[in-house]
Amino acid sequence: MKPVLQNNLPVWSSIAGLFFLLLATSHGVAGAPSTAPDFTLKANTGKNVRLRELQGEVVMINFWATWCGPCRLEMPKLEQLHRQYQKTGFTLLGVNLDDNSGNAIGMVKKLGVSFPILFDKDKRVSKLYKVDAMPMTVLIDRDGKLRYLHRGYKAGYEDIYQTQVRELLKE
């Protein structure tokens, strides 16, 4: 996987720092975006979801686990993003890496998450995407190209996600 942008910068407390953070995340690294690896995983609805079938939409994939504190903090923010953009050509997929999917189902219910949760128990998809931090979030454009990669989560990242989703929806 050759992502266009990696966001693992600290959240700055000053206005100038926030401006720099937003500016830094709006530019990609040299090179053309690569195609997002295709996969099929079972969702919490019982149906299989195949990434390739979502081409034409902007897709956010969030890799997470119940044991990850930042993942639990981020989940309600992702739910807000999902609700805001789900009718505009945007799909949010949560890929859970827990060995026991029951833990994920319980947490999703507790947090009121309505976007699809996919189960990657054998870690095949997380290996495809080279997940090396939790949570890890990728944004894929309508053509199926990887455009943004975010490792970890800190308060304020959801504003960056929203800016990037809007940008990709306009393309």
Image (cartoon, helix red, strand yellow):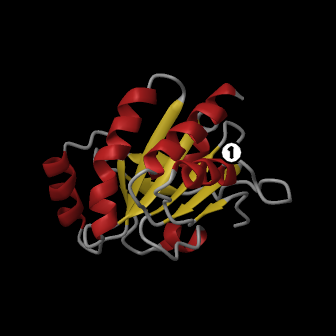
Q: Quadrant of the C terminus?
A: top right
Disc 1 crowd, CA 10 A, few/some/many (<14, 14-19, 20+): many
Query: Is 88 or 116 nearer to us in this picture?
Result: 88
Query: Is 6 or 59 nearer to us in this picture?
Result: 6
- The reply to whether residue 56 is in sight is no
- Residue plotted at (23% across, 71% down): 100
- Residue plotted at (50% across, 70% down): 126
- The reply to whether residue 18 is in sight is yes
Disc 1 secondary structure class: loop
Residue annotated with mark 1: 144
- Left or right side of 75 for 168: right
Q: Is residue 4 above or below residue 66?
A: above
**x%, y% of residue 153?**
42, 62
- Left or right side of 114 for 55: right
Callout 1, which amino acid? Answer: Gly
Q: Quadrant of the N terminus?
A: bottom right
- Outermost residue to the right: 31
- Left or right side of 127 for 109: left
**x%, y% of residue 89?**
54, 27
Q: What is the total number of numbered labels drawn onto the structure image?
A: 1
**x%, y% of residue 38?**
61, 55
Query: Is 27 or 12 nearer to us in this picture?
Result: 12
Query: Is 114 or 48 nearer to us in this picture?
Result: 114
Q: Is residue 118 above or below residue 76?
A: below
- Residue plotted at (28% across, 39% down): 114
**x%, y% of residue 138?**
56, 55
The image quarter in which residue 8 lies: bottom right
